[in-house]
Amino acid sequence: MAKLLIIDDERAIRSTLREILEYESYDVDDIDNGIDGLELIKKNNYDLVLCDIKMNKMDGMEVLENALALKPDLPFIMISGHGTVETAIEASKKGAFDFVSKPPDLNRLLITVRNALDRGTLVTETKVLKRKVSKTRHILGDSESIGRIKETIDRVAPTEARVLITGANGSGKELVARWIHEKSNRAESPLIEVNCAAIPSELIESELFGHEKGSFTSAVKQRIGKFELANGGTLFLDEIGDMSLSAQAKVLRALQEHKITRVGGEKELDVNVRVIAATNKDLLKEIEDGNFRMDLYHRLNVINIHVPHLTERTDDIPVIAQHFLEEICNDYGMPVKKINDAAMNALKGLPWTGNVRELHNMIERLIILSDKVITENDVVAFANPTGGTNIGAANGNGHATATHGGSAIDYDRFSNFQDYKDHAEKEFIKFKLEKNNWNVSKTADDIEIQRSHLYSKIEKFGLKRSE
């Protein structure tokens, strides 16, 4: 049911319009002045406003301007007993959907209302679709660290400097890379992404540089690699810390000489690519351990942007949570729910091991499972998908733990996020393998990775079938 607001200082007009619109099954509020009307617009999510032009305290044109500054997509129908062509044109220029003279022709008014509501629906749907198609979202937050990141992006983007983005999983490294590309001189050219952690080591070179037909057993046709696809644009190498040493050597050559050679090929191909890399690993430690090339590290690390953990910028959580709340509710076509202060403080106190990505999932869960107002009890109850996480409890040693189905995890035993990630990955894969009676093919399909990659994980974690 569409929610409408009537702003008019004539009681008779308000009563007549309200009666007609409620008869058409609209939910209607009315008010006799523009100042109070603006307050109602701030507090409520109206689908349409019908506003008189000549009113005491604040005229309709001023209400229109102030309201559209707050909610640019809110449809306005202006009503006036002194209507002229000039007034109608001025209202349209200021953003009004239409102009109706007093006394209104009721049939024309109802048609105008329906058209305005249809337009509002189309605008909302278009925004949702554009957001789903485009992965470039706003970098949310007002903290000092986010301010520095935005400033760095503005400075670095127009240059050709390579950028290394560091930070934990889910913190927003990909978003930073996308904004560097969007604000660069290459914005009209493609941004090609490669997740180095998701590609088996034996296939990464083919993925990056392409291959010639017959270069190996399954190479039944020529393949164009990501470097070629990104020519003239930007190549984003996500989780570059997981790239094999042989692939690192070829990437280094591509960065130095701006040339590549396909796997199994002899011809050198010129490429004009700006490389942005990201990792959740400590690459200096990886260099010490012999897993990453120092010369490649220095080639990539011209500009370093570190994206902080969400727990390091908890003051940004209310801004991010409110944005996700409005976005998800709009996607679901439901009224925007509210989060009370206690619930917001509870959100700020959570550990956020999955960072902003986890916060998005949490808000979506709260929207689905809670009532109109999200409370602290909702946050505590739904902090874990099973509702069984006891966050902030302490074990006998005073360490923070979380319990899942009766077993406790001592987070302090993990020296860094990668250790915890490996532990969680190992337990997840072990659970899925046992569930499928160690059918590797079925398990690979279930968790949506390649079978060869799953075998690598089994070997990495030393998983064995129990007798």
Image: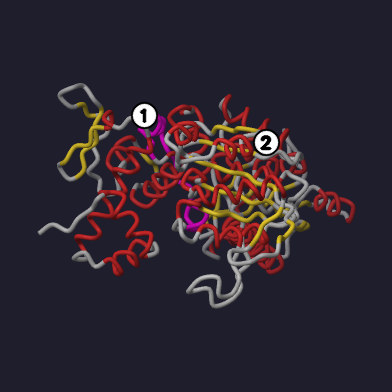
The residue depicted at 59 percent of the width and 67 percent of the height is 264
In the image shown, does 172 or 433 lie closer to the viewer?
A: 433
Q: How is the image coloured?
A: secondary structure
Residue 322 appearing in the image: no
- Return the x and y of residue 435 as percentages of the image width and height: 20, 62
Residue 179 vertical placement versus 231 (above, below): above
The residue depicted at 23 percent of the width and 25 percent of the height is 399
- Return the x and y of residue 88 as percentages of the image width and height: 83, 54
In the image shown, does 307 or 217 lie closer to the viewer?
A: 217
In the image shown, does 398 or 29 lie closer to the viewer?
A: 398
Q: Residue reaching furthest right?
A: 86
Badge 1: how crowded within 10 Å, few (<14), some, or many (20+)? few
Q: Which mark is residue 248?
A: none
**What residue sits right under mark 2 in the picture?**
153
In the image shown, does 393 or 112 lie closer to the viewer?
A: 393
Q: Are marks 1 and 2 in contact (CB under 8 Å)?
A: no
- Return the x and y of residue 2 as percentages of the image width and height: 54, 58
- Return the x and y of residue 136 as percentages of the image width and height: 61, 50
Residue 93 vertical placement versus 167 (above, below): below
The residue depicted at 67 percent of the width and 54 percent of the height is 75
Q: Is residue 7 left or right of residue 294?
A: right
Tag 1 secondary structure: loop
Q: Residue reaching furthest left?
A: 467
Residue 86 vertical placement versus 267 (above, below): above
Residue 203 appearing in the image: yes
Along the polypeptide, which appears first: circle 1 or circle 2? 2
Q: Residue reaching furthest bottom?
A: 220
**What residue sits right under mark 1 in the picture?**
349
Span highlighted in magenta in the image: 329-353
